[in-house]
Amino acid sequence: MNIYIVSLGCARNLVDSEVMSGKLKNAGHALIQDPEEADVIIVNTCSFIEAATEESIDAILGLAIHKKEGGCRRLIVTGCLPQRYGSDIVTTLPEVDLFLGTGAYDRILDAIGNVPVESACLLPDPDAITVNGADTPREITTGPAAYLKIAEGCSRHCTYCIIPRLRGRQKSRSVGDIVAEAEKLAAAGVRELTLVAQDTTAYGQDLAGNIDLSVLLKQLSGISKNIWIRLLYGHPESITDAMIETVAAHANICPYFDLPVQHASSAVLKRMGRHYDTDGLYKLFEKIRNVMPEAALRTTLITGFPGESDTDFRQLLSFVGDIRFDHLGVFVYSDADDLPSHRLPDPVAPAVARRRRDRLMKMQKKISAQKNLAHLERIYPVLVESSPEPGVYLGRTRFQAPEVDGLTILHAKHQLGIGSIVSARITDALEYDLMATPLSDTDEAGT
């Protein structure tokens, strides 16, 4: 059959979609890019915040039209949306033929065929999720870069977060299994591996023995010196000195630290269930920059959390101005009655939360522009990822992560190979993107 899959939400969700695609392709089905020609449409959903839920529902309803006006015979919804809202969603979205929760991805072949299933909404216990291994089929959709999921689930209890309920407790893969998958990806031509999990820096804490992220990074670094290794979704509580030192000691591990701190006020952090304080955050980022002055720092913040006062917000503004993150995202607090934070007193008006977000992003826009100007005339290795038109290429430096950060736009007189890493001189700086010219169209910059 012709299968169309749309993946919503984070990179971890994308890996799940790629695994489903790999299983479908191995079973002889065709993965297509046009929903109008699909026999089966699969929507892999996100419901982390209200906006993500709305996006998922809009996508489902938009694609459901192909059941009425096209050849689609089956519409399947997978992932966090059914897992969060349960079997009630069956009557809410009658357009959907079958819902698979986060623990039911392995039922995708049954779901698209005529194999009977227990109900219209399959919601196995997320703690029983089988973590995919190196031998699991997977269809990479991200060109010369790929995400490598090193663990599933999360064992923390942040009051604003639904993820542990949707994904279960942390379940780390073994070092050997992750390395085996990384070797397969490298052999297939992948030039950048981005490690992802719900709490990436907590990797290995649930495994026997002295296994942690630094051990895994050392093993991955040895696969090839010409492959970049990057980490997303770290946590201030689980990052260790050993991990920081490992990044500094290996040239092919990007000196890039994605550590969503969520806030900088000790009072707000306590209500969030985050077990660090303002002083600890300053010390953490000072430590990283002392070890690696060139390190790129990225974080995400939440405005409008219950009880966030003007004083708390001013402290957050000062923190952002002091640290001067290379990349920063801000979300308005998303309330829901299934979150512990819903029961906290002193809610913040949504309009106030939005104004605070906008003020932070205005500040970050200036910081980002200033930091980009500092790159002018410097030479960096750039991973070439695509070419939207002749002579123009889109790529990324080691301080730019896929999807979440800006791009480096290359203007080349001669053809560049997609997936090549070229030396390039930065010629212009925008607020978030960089312009560059390759030093040589054939010069491989390595790591």
Image: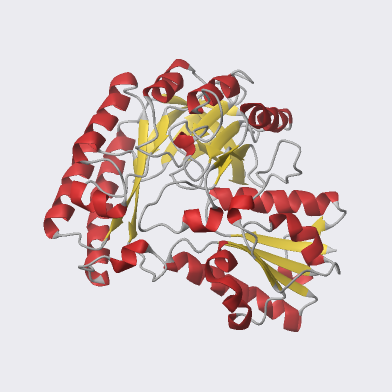
Decide if residue 270 is on the left or right side of residue 255: left
For the point 20% across and 62% down, the residue is 307
Taking the view exactly as shown, the residue that stands out farthest to the front is 208
Identify the image quadrant of residue 375. Answer: top left
Q: Percent from the top left, x then y, of residue 116?
A: 83, 70
Q: Nearer the viewer, residue 159 or 47?
A: 159
Identify the image quadrant of residue 276. Answer: top left
Q: Percent from the top left, x then y, of residue 294?
A: 35, 25
Q: How is the image coloured?
A: secondary structure
Taking the view exactly as shown, the residue that stands out farthest to the left is 311
For the point 80% across and 75% down, the residue is 73
Q: Nearer the viewer, residue 363 or 373?
A: 363
For the point 19% across and 36% down, the residue is 279
| Quadrant of the frame with the N terminus | bottom right
- Count of residue discs: 0
Q: Nearer the viewer, residue 336 or 369?
A: 336
Q: Percent from the top left, x then y, of residue 204?
A: 52, 32
Q: Percent from the top left, x then y, of residue 398?
A: 47, 30
For the point 70% across and 69% down, the residue is 76
Can residue 74 be spotted in the picture?
yes
Can residue 72 be spotted in the picture?
no
Image height check: is 267 above or below 408?
below
